[in-house]
């Protein structure tokens, strides 16, 4: 079997996708901008010179779109053209439950992938549990508070390992999925319930503080997100407050054969 190119291979899902593919005996070509990682190819969305070498001899691609770019299609379309030219058969796109097919934004990549790849899957995961671990936590926290504009709205947070497990099926199953997968964890939780669960686990008080979407966008921008992307991300909290993410799907279990992991299990494994 030819290599599977894993874009974003140093990131939350890509690192797990690469590891799980290797566990399954699939040859992997991890890609990122980071220089000097053993076995990685250098790949930069904004530098088309890096695209053709990364795609050479590849049969399938795990595609994490350029991060923090409000309009990724102009960067991704030439890459998909090159993939087609080189005979890549399968593309698995990491999108989001908050994003459906559209003419702009991340949603514009859905149509591009379907049109260019003979075999394709669009992954639409809910919000990641890993947003509450490691460096990602700083993006949403301030002095013992989790900030959100979600009110009492709930989100069926999903473990990144479950996303990666589904991605590996989509990349390596003999029969292509050729569909969208809406992926969630097993229960929908409000940010207040999340803060309580983390507090119970660590013994250190963390509470949910309601802010406006404007305040949240400013907080995101202070933490390094480009201002237009910070505004787009903060606006998604308003959708959550209206119930947009209050849903649970059985897709993880249907594809992988085991139930999606719970938030409690995530805390036990990843929160210190
Ligand atoms: N967090 C959530 O709750 C959530 C929910 C649903 C969907 N999503 C989607 O998930 C995606 C992020 O995936 P993730 O969390 O697995 O990744 P991540 O942890 O944010 O890491 C991003 C990866 O992309 C690479 N990268 C960043 N900019 C790049 C560029 N210009 N060219 C090439 N590579 C680049 C980074 O590697 P280097 O820096 O080493 O190059 C890294 O490996 C986003 O599209 C987001 O919309 C997130």
Image: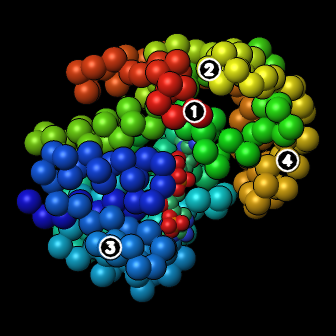
Q: Earlier in the sequence, mark 4 or mark 1?
A: 4
Among numbered discs 4 and 2, the one appearing first in the sequence: 2
Of mark 2 and mark 3, the one earlier in the sequence is: 3
> Is 215 positioned to the left or the right of 20 in the image?
right
Residue linked to disc 3: 38
Q: Is residue 173 visible?
A: yes
For disc 3, the neighbor class at 10 Å (few under 14, some 14 to 19, many from 20) is few
**SS at circle 1:** loop
Q: Quadrant of residue 6?
A: bottom left
Q: Report, in whole angstroms, how far the alpha carbon at label 2 lies from the one at label 3.
A: 36 Å
Q: Nearer the viewer, mark 4 or mark 2?
A: 2
Report helix, strand or loop for mark 2: helix
Q: Are marks 2 and 1 in contact (CB under 8 Å)?
A: yes
User: Splitting the image into 4 quarters, where does residue 180 fall?
Assistant: top left
Q: Vertical placement of 209 versus 125: above or below? A: above
Mark 4 to mark 3 CA distance (whole Å): 36 Å
Q: To which residue does mark 1 refer?
A: 271
The residue that appears at 63% across and 35% down in the rendered structure is: 132
- Quadrant holding the N terminus: bottom left
| In-image side of 37 versus 22 (left or right) | right
Q: Nearer the viewer, mark 4 or mark 3?
A: 3
- Which comes before the other along the chain, label 1 or label 3? 3
Residue 174 in picture, x, y percent from top left? 10, 42
Q: Nearer the viewer, residue 245 or 207?
A: 207
User: Residue 158's mark?
Assistant: none
Gap between marks 2 and 1, in whole Å? Answer: 8 Å
Q: Nearer the viewer, residue 2 or 272?
A: 272
Q: Which mark is residue 219?
A: 4
Question: Image point 23% across, 39% down: which residue?
Answer: 169
Q: 105 or 246: which is nearer to us? A: 246
Query: What residue did someone put label 2 on?
Result: 201
Graded by Cα atoms within 10 Å as few (under 14), some (14 to 19) or many (20 or more), the crowding at tag 4 reads some
């Amino acid at each position: 079997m030819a290599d599977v190119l894993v874009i974003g291979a140093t990131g939350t899902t890509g690192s797990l996708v690469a590891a799980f593919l290797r566990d399954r005996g699939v040859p992997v070509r991890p890609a990122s901008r980071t220089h000097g990682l053993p076995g990685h190819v250098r790949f930069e969305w904004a530098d088309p010179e890096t695209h053709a070498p990364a795609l050479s001899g590849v049969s399938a691609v795990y595609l994490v779109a350029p991060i923090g770019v409000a309009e990724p299609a102009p960067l991704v379309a030439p890459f998909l053209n090159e993939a087609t030219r080189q005979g890549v058969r399968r593309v698995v796109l990491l999108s989001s439950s908050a994003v459906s097919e559209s003419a702009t934004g991340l949603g514009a990549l859905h149509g591009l992938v379907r049109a260019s790849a003979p075999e394709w899957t669009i992954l639409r995961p809910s919000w990641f549990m890993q947003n509450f671990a490691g460096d990602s936590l700083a993006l949403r926290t301030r002095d013992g508070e989790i900030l959100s504009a979600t009110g009492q709205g709930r989100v069926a947070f999903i473990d990144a390992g479950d996303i990666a497990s589904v991605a590996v099926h989509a990349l390596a199953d003999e029969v292509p999925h050729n569909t969208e997968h809406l992926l969630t964890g097993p229960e929908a939780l409000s940010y207040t319930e999340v803060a309580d669960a983390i507090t119970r686990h660590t013994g250190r008080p963390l509470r949910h503080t309601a802010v406006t979407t404007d305040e949240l966008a400013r907080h995101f921008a202070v933490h390094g997100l480009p201002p237009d992307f910070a505004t787009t991300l903060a606006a998604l909290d308003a959708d959550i407050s209206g119930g947009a993410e209050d849903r649970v799907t059985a897709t993880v279990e249907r594809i992988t054969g085991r139930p999606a992991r719970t938030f409690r299990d995530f805390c036990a494994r990843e929160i210190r």
